[in-house]
Amino acid sequence: MSKKLLKSGAIVSSMTLISRVLGLVRDVVVANLLGAGTGADVFFFANRIPNFLRRLFAEGAFAQAFIPVFTQYKQQEDDSELRALVARVSGTLGLIVTLVTLVGILASPVVAMIFGTGWFLDWLHDKPGADKFELASVLLKITFPYLWFITFTGMSGAILNSFNRFAVAAFTPVFLNVAIIAAAIFLSPHMAQPAMALAWGVFFGGLLQFSFQLPFLWRLGMLRRPRWGWHHAGVTQIRKLMIPALFGVSVSQLNLLFDTFMASFLVSGSISWLYYSDRLLEFPLGLFGIAIATVILPSLSQRHVDQDPKAFRQTMDWAVRMIWLLGLPAMVGMMVLAGPMLRVLFMRGEFDQSDVSHAAASLIAYMSGLLFFMLIKVLAPGYYARQDTRTPVRYGIIAMLSNMLFNLILVLPFGYVGLAAATAFSAVINASLLYWGLAKSNVYRLSRFTLLFMLRVVVSTAIMAVAMYEVFPHWSTWMVSSWHHSAMMLIEAIGLAIVVYLVSLVALGGRLSHLKSSSGAVSDD
């Protein structure tokens, strides 16, 4: 079982790595083109709103509700019923998302006013920031159709994942990155406002992602004509699961939107600094956390349908071990190398040394919660696979309210860095509550096997951190060095950190069998 999950996880991580590397290239191009000024703030704002809704209608709440029901139909019903479910879900979801997209396009100034209140007030009182509100209203009209494309992309990806076709869905985001890079290079020179070109890149990127997956659905016989089916039994089951999950799964996105709202009142550049640091956070989160969560949800759903609680716990235990193995050293390493990474990746063109220093501060704050962001990704499927979406909602409400409280406490003394730290703190609360709920209901507890493995990881990571502090040059050295020299130092630093971590882990008893085998990894009842 674990060998199959490990193979699937490796496939998703490999495809995700390609996408994330291109995503970094995209961000380098955008940083060079826009820096952290007005255009960058507004583009990231206009891109964040449809991306937030994407987590609701596509990859987030919908997938968490759809995959368990789809797996149940796949296991218990014939092919005609399975295809009917796909047709009814796509038709029902499609009409709803079409209406939301049209409202978003037509009411873009209202959306910009709600989430960019600081800019709207500047526009209302004819202050210097008024142009941000006007540009945001226009860009939202271009980026909002991305929601429509990515919703169907997310649904087809969920279907493909349920058939263990993980590579296709994991590779799909590459097309968005390619489209934005192409728009920045070839389209922006012909536009007065470069951010407008990037918005069109988002639009065409969504179209490419949607088109790419259609042939794979056709080969599986799952490309069906959409039909309205609000009262279809499967659709009813999905929407009952999805309605509470709309909130529970998207707590982190709501937190980011609240951060954006707060940042619109702060110094210009705050949204951009938070964006660049969040993008680096998303790299290991997507490469490890989301990849592992993607492969375990169909497996957990099947274990639940088969009424096999032992295999269910084994799968959860394997996922937690993988998160600790990869997440803790990534968190510590990226906190130590925050400044150097930003310097090498983004310091060119309009993105200067001051932007690097500001973004590094928020990156360190975000990174302090990386392990817990990852744990949320693998603990939440323990509820969704059992078709329990209400419990994570309760925990999500607590986490979101905590984030808002932390924001209010930390924003005055620490500004935008306080917003990042508040998001990290809320992730700690959310992950802790999710684990507590699973343990309390006797669904999953950390096994002694995994606890010992976690201890080895903690000690190995501590040894790695000490080595990094002792060997790596001071921050000022990175800033005065050439780009080439800084890049070489960064590569050497990452290589040394990996070697020290792995050698330490092996010396402490860590073995490859701990990742492939689930023997001894089942918690006591």
Image (cartoon, rainbow, N blue to C red):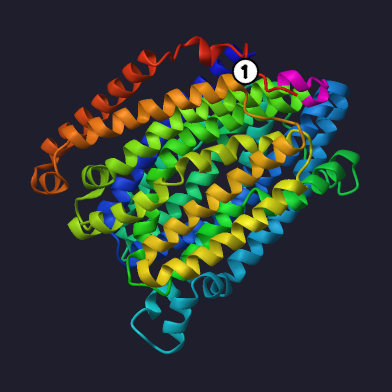
Q: Is residue 379 left or right of residue 185?
A: right
- Residue at horizontal 36%, vertical 78%? 129
Residue at the extreme bottom? 125
Q: Is residue 217 visible?
A: no
* 27 inside magenta stretch: no
Q: Nearer the viewer, residue 149 or 368?
A: 368
| 236 versus 141 height, above or below | above
* 306 inside magenta stretch: yes
- Residue at horizontal 87%, vertical 23%? 76
- Residue at horizontal 49%, vertical 38%? 173
Query: Residue 521 location in percent, x, y?
Result: 62, 18
| 217 versus 3 height, above or below | below
- Residue at horizontal 47%, vertical 11%? 512
Task: List the residue tagged with mark 1.
Answer: 521
- Quarter that holds the N terminus: top right
| 222 versus 56 height, above or below | above
Q: Quadrant of residue 413?
A: bottom left
Q: Nearer the viewer, residue 113 or 245?
A: 245
Q: Residues within 10 Å of mark 1 (few under 14, many from 20)?
A: many
| Highlighted range, magenta | 304-311
